[in-house]
Amino acid sequence: MSNKPSSSSDDLLPERKRKRPTGVNSIDDGIEANECIEFYMVSSKDEVDSPSRFQFVPIDLNAFFEDDGRIYGYQDLKITVWISSISFRAYADISFKSKLNRGKGITDLKTAFQSILADNLVEEKDDFLQTFSTECDYVKSVVSKAEVLPKNTANGCTGNSSYMKEEPADVEVFRVKGTEVGHLYCRLVPLVLLLIDGSNPIDITDPSWEIYLTVQKGQQDSSMKLLGFAAVYRFHKYPDSMRLRLGQILILPPYQRKGYGCTLLKVINNVAISDDIYDLTIEEPVKSLQHVRTCIDVQRLLAFEPIHEALGPIISQLRNNDPSKKSKAYRCGPPANIVEDVRKNLKINKRQFLQCWEVLIYVSLGAVKKHIENWKTVISNRVRADVIGKESEGAGKRLIDIPTQFDQRMSFAMFKTNGGESDMLMKDENQGNIEEELRKLVDERITEIKAVAKKLSVKNKAK
């Protein structure tokens, strides 16, 4: 980590005789960290300072700098951070024209970067460049003691499916358990902080954590390159079973959108089945992860023979009946026995299965407009019931917007009434807003379902 202020004649003058630089305000407004810091991931010392280096954008750098996310006391500040994809060591090159306290103090950049990069931070650039030689076998040394996990298995599927296609031969997935988890994860923490939204480091002293590594083997040598990782927690399910919870998953920026995350998720599914886990859950998945997860699970479900028998009556009803004309809200949930069969055989938890079930209905229904409109009515009924409650007319739950300084869409009050004139008046005043929010939620859900169906369609055409 280097500080390189540029020299000027003013630097030689006593403090009291220095002239204020032209255009500099008397009060330091600071600069947002996101505006002056660039991050690069490099796999060799030749990539450092090279146009071919891979730049990535962290989730939010401002969170590491003071309360307002700004850096103070520097003029023309520019910071370049390199992170090695070989050893995960890092180096920060800091340059600025001048440093001066103009009322807000001078941000301690060294402390700030140590809070992000910890022991991975290397002070001198030459030492950082040396790590590409001295620690070139770091990943290989880690996986030498780890368990290799099978990639291509039936995974609970009983039919033919693109899910069971061959995975890349040069990619392996390893599981790291026990004391080795802590040593490895400490190297990965900076990537967790920078690239996983809202994530905190796991407790490496807890033996229930396991790390899964997706690694690519060199084609011409014995080198190994880390493509991504996942942190999975194994915990007790009363009375005598275990559950798996995926806490963190990350494919390194240079290797994203190449199918490696999909491979990693499939292997974790394999583990849940082979270890006879009760079910697999994911802790607060972001939309992109949920999309990939649902694509995988729908493929598995389409290859699970009991699903088609359970779908038959639902598809028939949607093709032959109009749910909008029913006196009661028409629901198309799966039978209880198929929910349990899916959990036992595929280890898909109930909440995730219900998400997949709506996709399964859509892809099985066909392209007839009337049938799709019936399906949309079912989705609308389900969303309405989830948000307002099953009794959306007359006595029941009421949803009312309230003024807030936070996200208006997430701020509301809900209560239950017994009916009456005052309730109807309140309903009239708020019904428009409620219906608009419900339409948005329904549209978002339909868009999500169609995106999964489109992805599956593209994969099937590519076979």
Image (spheres, rainbow, N blue to C red):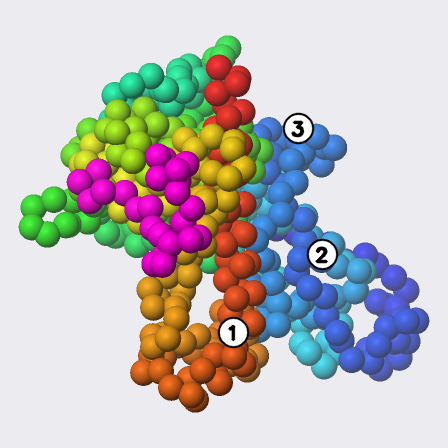
The amino acid type found where label 2 is placed reads Cys
Specify few, some or many for label 3: CA neighbours under 10 Å numbering under 14, 14-19, or 20 or more: few
Specify few, some or many for label 1: CA neighbours under 10 Å numbering under 14, 14-19, or 20 or more: some
Q: In the orientation shown, which residue stands out farthest toward the left?
A: 239
N-terminal label among 3 and 1 = 3
Residue behind mark 3: 46
Point 44% across, 17% down: residue: 168
Point 26% across, 29% down: residue: 309
**Which residues fall within the magenta stretch?**
315-338
The amino acid type found where label 1 is placed reads Gln
Disc 2/disc 1 C-alpha distance (Å): 47 Å
Between 130 and 144, the one nearer to me in the picture: 144
Q: Nearer the viewer, mark 3 or mark 1?
A: 1
State the image coordinates of residue 17 (x, y, percent, origin top left). Answer: 89, 79
Disc 3/disc 1 C-alpha distance (Å): 63 Å
State the image coordinates of residue 296 (x, y, percent, origin top left). Answer: 39, 32
Q: Is residue 276 visible?
A: yes
Q: Is residue 268 visible?
A: no
Provide the secondary structure element on which disc 2 rests. Answer: helix
Residue behind mark 1: 431
Provide the secondary structure element on which disc 1 rests. Answer: helix
Residue behind mark 2: 36
Point 49% across, 85% down: residue: 425
Between 118 and 306, the one nearer to me in the picture: 306
